[in-house]
Image (spheres, rainbow, N blue to C red):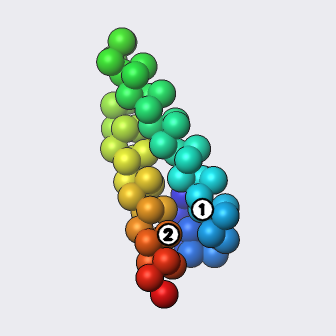
Amino acid sequence: MKQSEINEASTADLQEALADRKQAYTDLKMAHTITPLENPIQLKGHRRAIARIATELTKRDVQ
């Protein structure tokens, strides 16, 4: 998810996306533990996407 998409999305959509990303990250991490991923950089991308969404949600709560 790009930052512009995150800024335009509603809070409910962001919360849903955050839950989906966290689940996908957990699944990917487990798969990587069992058999190494072909592209382990995917883990980094998921972590950063989770952080972007969580930061936007926190920013909206503060306002």
Compared to residue 25, the image places residue 46 above or below, namely: below
- Counting from the top left corner in percent of width and height, residue 36 is at 33, 17
51 lies left or right of 5: left
Compared to residue 62, the image places residue 13 above or below, namely: above
Compared to residue 63, the image places residue 53 above or below, namely: above
- Counting from the top left corner in percent of width and height, residue 44 is at 34, 44
Mark 1 lies on a secondary structure that is helix
Question: Would you say residue 17 is visible in this rendering?
Answer: yes
5 lies left or right of 33: right
What's the CA distance linking mark 2 and mark 1? 7 Å
Local crowd size for mark 2, using a 10 Å CA cut-off: few (<14), some (14–19), many (≥20): some
Mark 2 lies on a secondary structure that is helix
Question: Would you say residue 37 is visible in this rendering?
Answer: no
Count the labels in the image: 2
- Counting from the top left corner in percent of width and height, residue 54 is at 44, 62
- Counting from the top left corner in percent of width and height, residue 63 is at 48, 87
The amino acid type of the residue labelled 1 equals Leu
Q: Mark 2 points at which residue?
A: 57
Q: Which residue is drawn at 54% across and 58% down?
A: 1
Q: Residue at x 48, y 27 (%)?
A: 27
Marks 2 and 1: CB-CB under 8 Å?
yes
**Res. 37 image quadrant:** top left
Q: Residue at x 58, y 44 (%)?
A: 20
Label located before the other in sequence (2 or 1): 1
23 or 48: nearer the eye?
23
Identify the mark at residue 14; answer none if there is no mark: 1
Local crowd size for mark 1, using a 10 Å CA cut-off: few (<14), some (14–19), many (≥20): some
Q: Residue at x 37, y 54 (%)?
A: 48
**Res. 5 image quadrant:** bottom right
